[in-house]
Image: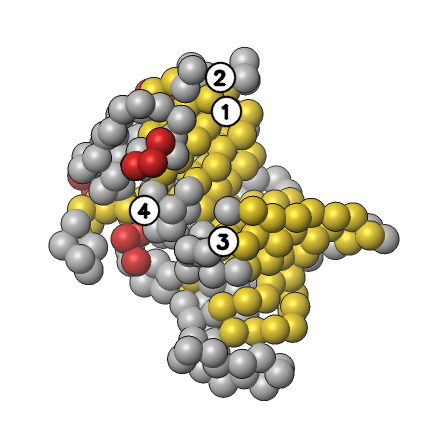
């Protein structure tokens, strides 16, 4: 994955492009508005019930999937109305946003519980993730998500087949995915990282990285081609082989 970020007249533009993940981008105005464009077949742009359907805004369907070429602001409704976006992350077909004040929002594809909303349904508009703590940072992977809280905890949810969640979630937080694998549909605390005070988090397609306050890097999930910076492979269990790089 690679990207570019620039500031121009108070507008911060962030573009994420990957050969394996669909191109997505979001722009943040000083007012805390979130603007999205790109693929929208699962509602990952947060634009509403017409996700994947008609495209009156000049976008194209390309390969049968809705693609919106013009940036548009994501509307926050109901109890989220008036919320200001502090940061956002885009996964393969889902998106996450953190509001000023720490509320975590999720929208798009819900398969494997990657939205953390307790089920596997798609959400075409932003919904608040029931985490119960103020969120500081978030990251979105292929089918999983991470979030850190102001109190220093790391939470994970979604597909954990490669160990990319770093935790064995409690039974009430799990369900069977459409592919017959157990997944985590609610945020689960990664207790193994309780003492590190996370400074940054990132997700690949099926692995995760967490930077500790002291600069140490922790990795967990798939390790083919050495993508985790370690010489071990840990596949097939939700908790995975969480370890420190270097």
Q: Is residue 232 above or below residue 63?
A: above
The numbered mark, 1 or 2, whose residue comes first in the sequence reads 1
CA–CA distance in space, label 1 to label 4: 20 Å
- The answer to the question of whether label 4 and label 3 lie on touching residues, with beta carbons closer than 8 A, is no
Task: Specify whether residue 107 is in view.
Answer: no
Pinpoint residue 231: horizontal percent, then vertical percent: 31, 23
Q: Which mark is residue 211?
A: 1
Q: Is residue 161 above or below residue 31?
A: above
Q: Earlier in the sequence, mark 4 or mark 3?
A: 3
Provide the secondary structure element on which disc 1 rests.
strand
Marks 4 and 3: which is nearer the front? 3
Q: Is residue 237 above or below residue 114?
A: above
Along the horizontal axis of the image, is 234 left or right of 123? Answer: left
Q: Looking at the image, is mark 3 or mark 2 earlier in the sequence?
A: 3
Residue 197, percent across and down? 50, 19
Name the N-terminal-most of marks 2 and 4: 4
Residue at x-position 62% and y-position 54%? 15
Q: Which residue is mark 3?
A: 18
Residue picked out by circle 2: 216
* Separation of residues labelled 2 and 4 (CA atoms): 25 Å
Distance from the alpha carbon under mark 1 to that under mark 3: 22 Å
Q: Which residue is mark 4?
A: 158
Identified at 42% across, 71% down, the residue is: 41
Q: In front of the other: label 3 or label 2?
A: 3
* On screen, residue 152 above or below 109: above
Secondary-structure class at tag 4: strand
- Distance in Å between CA atoms under marks 3 and 2: 26 Å
Mark in the foreground, 2 or 4: 2
Query: Nearer the observer, disc 1 or disc 3?
Result: 3
Sequence-wise first label, 1 or 4: 4
Identify the residue shown where x is 49% and y is 85%: 54
Image quadrant for the C terminus?
A: top left
């Amino acid at each position: 994955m690679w990207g570019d970020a620039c500031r121009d007249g108070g507008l911060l533009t962030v573009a994420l492009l990957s050969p394996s993940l669909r191109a997505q981008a979001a722009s943040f105005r000083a007012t805390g508005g979130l603007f999205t464009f790109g693929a929208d077949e699962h509602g990952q742009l947060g634009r509403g019930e017409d996700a994947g359907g008609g495209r009156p805004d000049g976008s194209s369907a390309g390969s049968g999937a809705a693609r919106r070429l013009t940036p548009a602001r994501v509307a926050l409704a109901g109890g989220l109305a008036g919320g200001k976006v502090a940061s956002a992350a885009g996964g393969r077909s889902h998106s996450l946003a953190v509001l000023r004040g720490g509320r975590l929002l999720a929208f798009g594809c819900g398969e494997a519980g990657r939205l953390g909303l307790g089920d596997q349904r798609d959400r075409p508009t932003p919904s608040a993730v029931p985490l119960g703590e103020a969120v500081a940072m978030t990251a979105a992977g292929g089918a999983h998500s991470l979030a850190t809280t102001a109190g220093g905890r790391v939470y994970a949810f979604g597909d954990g087949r490669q160990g990319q969640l770093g935790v064995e979630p409690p039974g009430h937080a799990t369900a069977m995915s459409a592919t017959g694998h157990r997944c985590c549909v609610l945020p689960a605390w990664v207790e193994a990282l309780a003492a590190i005070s996370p400074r940054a988090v990132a997700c690949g397609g099926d692995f995760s990285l967490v930077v500790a306050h002291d600069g140490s890097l922790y990795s967990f999930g798939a390790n083919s081609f050495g993508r985790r910076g370690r010489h071990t492979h840990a596949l097939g269990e939700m908790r995975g082989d969480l370890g420190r790089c270097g």
